Image (spheres, helix red, strand yellow):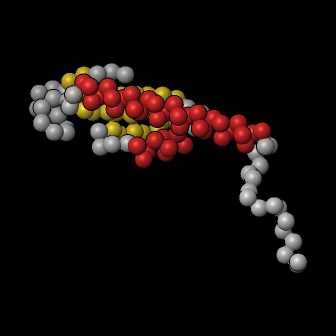
Amino acid sequence: MTERSAPSGGSTRGDGPTRTATVRTTHADAALVAAALAPDETDSMATRVDGDAIECAIERPTTGGLRATADDHVVNLRVADRLVERARAHLAADGGARRSDTNGDTDTNT
C-alpha cells in the first residue's frame, strides 16, 4: 500500500489535498472475489480486475480515513477469497456436481 498527498489543486474529490493508496492482491478467481466486494465499495474506491489480480485505488481526504477504508477493504478481501476457496473445495469434494434441494426423482408419471 502506498500513500501520498495529491499536489495542491490536484484533488479530484472535495477541497484540498487527498491521501491515496493502491491495494493490489492476487486470487485464484479474481473476478469472482471482486464481484463479492462490489456491494461494499464506496465512492472513494475504484476497483479493477487484471487477470488474477485485483487492484483497488482508494482516495480519502484524511490519513485516518484512508487507513480505515484500506483496512475494511483488506478484511473484505480476505473473507471473499476464503469463501471462493471453500466453495471450490466443496465442489471438488463433490466431484464438481451441484447439489439441489430436490430428491432427484424425475419420474412425472405418479
Q: Which quadrant does the N terminus fall into?
A: top left
Residue visible at 49% across and 45% down in the picture: 35
- The image position of residue 63, as x and y in percent, is 24, 24
Number of labels in the image equals 0
> Residue 110 lies in what quarter of the image?
bottom right
Give the answer, above or below, for where 67 lies relative to 96: above
Query: Could one spot residue 31 in this view of the protein?
Result: no
Residue visible at 77% across and 61% down in the picture: 102
Horizontal arrangement in the rendering, residue 35 relative to residue 60 (left or right): right
Horizontal arrangement in the rendering, residue 7 relative to residue 102 (left or right): left
Horizontal arrangement in the rendering, residue 72 relative to residue 64 (left or right): right
Residue visible at 39% across and 28% down in the picture: 71
Give the answer, above or below, for where 71 lies relative to 100: above
Horizontal arrangement in the rendering, residue 83 relative to residue 75 (left or right): right
Query: Could one spot residue 86 in this view of the protein?
Result: yes
Residue visible at 85% across and 65% down in the picture: 105
> Residue 87 lies in what quarter of the image?
top right
> Residue 107 lies in what quarter of the image?
bottom right
- The image position of residue 78, as x and y in percent, is 51, 31
Q: Nearer the viewer, residue 11 or 70?
A: 70
